[in-house]
Image (cartoon, rainbow, N blue to C red):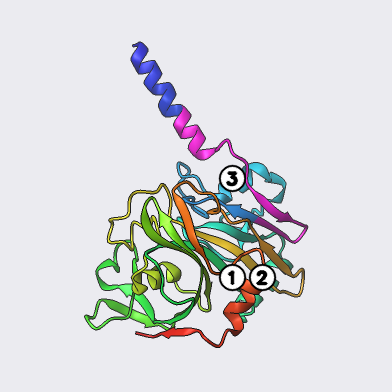
């Protein structure tokens, strides 16, 4: 009987902590128009399943006065991040702000930057990956895994997809060659950065799906939304987080090419004439 009580308490506590985590949301910016969060990895944006932790449910808990009952998930997320991806995510707090932000995304005026640590040492310094991405044929009725266009016919409905990559540091993660990179997606395809890095032969560390289900060593996928520049007619935003991989256990940089501490690192992706084009 005692063991059953202990087991019940453990299961109940785990259930409660899943729905109502002890850690509070990491708020990067808040105004009457927007709230910008630093999302944790491995959490859903929203979910209809009350047993699953999600940002929308945590927002409801911490900011009940901001809940919009006319919305299915209570808040208007003006863009999305993958379940595995951490970093900057913006929520509109009124109709005017949300519409203005949506217009900026539709007009391709938004600029997003991501940090990643990838397997292997990336050769070169700046790469533009221009490879169409579509759904993997075998996953159409499953997880909707994506793939780059290929000659074997496994890519369905490919769409143009462009990513810029800048090498920041080369080093080792847990003894294996790895590279820290800054990524700028110029298009917004599902899993775009993960697919493009895998296509280069440099899968993102911890990416179980696109490593052929082999990368299980770290406790997260090393992909982080670092900066969001969101010009809009209501309240322009330019929000950046710290580098979450700066002192991550197991990461040992040995070669430093570009530093996030200078604004030049973002400019370099825009104008550098020595960019290497990868289109196959």
Q: In which quarter of the image is residue 122?
A: bottom left
Residue 95: name its quadrant: bottom right
Query: On the image, numbered disc 2 is attached to which residue?
Result: 229
Helix, strand or loop for disc 3 = helix
At label 1, counting other C-alpha atoms closer than 10 Å, the crowd grade (few under 14, some 14-19, many 20 or more) is some
Is 164 or 186 nearer to us in this picture?
A: 164
Gap between marks 3 and 2, in whole Å? 25 Å
* Residue at the (41%, 56%) spot, across then down: 172
In this rendering, position of residue 25 left or right of residue 131: right
Q: What element carries label 2?
A: strand
Marks 2 and 1: in contact by CB < 8 Å?
Answer: yes
x then y, percent, for residue 28: 68, 54
Q: Where is residue 53 in the image (x, y as percent from the top left)?
A: 50, 45
Which residue is label 3 attached to? 58
Which residue in the structure is indicated by mark 1?
Answer: 112
On screen, residue 23 above or below 34:
above
Residue 88 lies in what quarter of the image?
Answer: bottom right
């Amino acid at each position: 009987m005692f063991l059953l009580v202990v087991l019940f308490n453990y299961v109940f506590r785990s259930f409660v902590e899943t729905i109502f985590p002890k850690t509070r949301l990491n708020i990067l910016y808040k105004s009457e128009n927007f709230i910008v969060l630093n999302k944790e990895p491995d959490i859903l944006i929203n979910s209809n399943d009350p047993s699953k932790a999600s940002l929308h449910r945590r927002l409801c808990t911490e900011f009940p006065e901001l809940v919009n009952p006319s919305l299915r998930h209570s808040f208007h997320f003006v863009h999305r991040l993958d379940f595995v991806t951490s970093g900057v995510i913006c929520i509109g707090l009124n109709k005017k702000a949300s519409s203005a932000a949506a217009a900026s995304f539709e007009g391709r005026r938004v600029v997003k930057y991501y940090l990643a640590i990838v397997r292997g040492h990336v050769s070169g310094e700046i790469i533009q990956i221009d490879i169409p991405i579509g759904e993997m044929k075998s996953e159409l009725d499953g997880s909707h895994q994506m793939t780059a266009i290929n000659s074997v016919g496994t890519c369905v409905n490919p769409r143009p997809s462009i990513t810029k990559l800048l090498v920041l540091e080369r080093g080792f993660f847990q003894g294996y060659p790895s590279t820290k990179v800054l990524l700028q997606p110029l298009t917004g395809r599902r899993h775009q950065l993960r697919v493009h890095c895998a296509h280069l032969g440099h899968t993102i560390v911890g990416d179980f799906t696109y490593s052929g289900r082999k990368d299980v060593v770290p406790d997260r996928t090393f992909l982080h939304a670092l900066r969001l520049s969101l010009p809009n007619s209501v309240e322009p935003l330019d929000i950046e987080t710290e580098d979450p991989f700066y002192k991550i256990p197991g990461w040992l940089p040995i070669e430093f090419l570009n530093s996030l501490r200078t604004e030049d690192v973002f400019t370099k992706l825009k104008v550098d004439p020595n960019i290497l084009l990868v289109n196959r």
